Amino acid sequence: MEANSNTSKKCPSYIGKVGAQLFGVVSKDGKVRFITPLTVTEDFIDQNRDKKNLEQRFRFTGKCVEGGCAQWDKEESRCTLSRKVQNLDNHKETELFFCPIRSQCRWFSQDGKEACFSCNEVTRNMEELLLNAQ
């Protein structure tokens, strides 16, 4: 049995909720600075409740729910958001940067390093824009 089977992949665009893992902070320039993951607690949620959306300021990860997610393509058994992010007309990195979840990341497992090059410019509110643009 494979240690990193599809069922153990992590979503790099998870919602901010208790039990999720905080793994990135959006800096003033809009880029995500990745950190060693920290488990989100009720205190963290309470301290950040009155500020703008958590997902606009932080990146979270959690278990990829595959077919339970709007971005999942059941026919291809893959997350469609990864390619949408790659197709954004953003400044893309050309070298891999530090990522604490790469070995478990759904996007990396599907698309390799190409999935990483725009990842530090993604916040969940961008995901919502991509979904609504369809």
Image (spheres, rainbow, N blue to C red):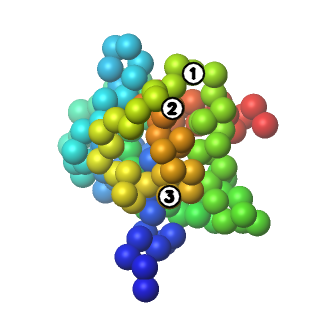
Tell me: residue 115, above or below residue 52: below
Measured as percent of width and height from the top left, residue 38 is found at 22, 48
Tell me: residue 7, above or below residue 16: below
The mark nearer the N terminus, 3 or 1, is 1
Quadrant showing the C terminus: top right
Q: Does dot 3 land on a helix, a strand or a loop? A: helix
Residue nearest the viewer, comparing 89 with 114 = 114
Residue at position x 62%, y 54% in the image: 79
The crowd level at tag 3 (other Cα within 10 Å; few <14, some 14-19, many 20+) is some
In the image, is 56 to the left or to the right of 19? right
Q: Quadrant of residue 59?
A: top left
Q: Quadrant of residue 63?
A: bottom left
In the image, is 51 to the left or to the right of 74? left
Residue named by callout 3: 109
Tell me: residue 5, above or below residue 79: below
Q: Does dot 2 land on a helix, a strand or a loop? A: loop
Tag shown at residue 90: 1
The crowd level at tag 2 (other Cα within 10 Å; few <14, some 14-19, many 20+) is many
Residue furthest out toward the bottom: 1
Q: Does dot 1 land on a helix, a strand or a loop? A: loop
Residue nearest the viewer, comparing 1 with 20 = 1
Residue named by callout 2: 118
| Contact flag, marks 2 and 1 (Cβ < 8 Å) | yes
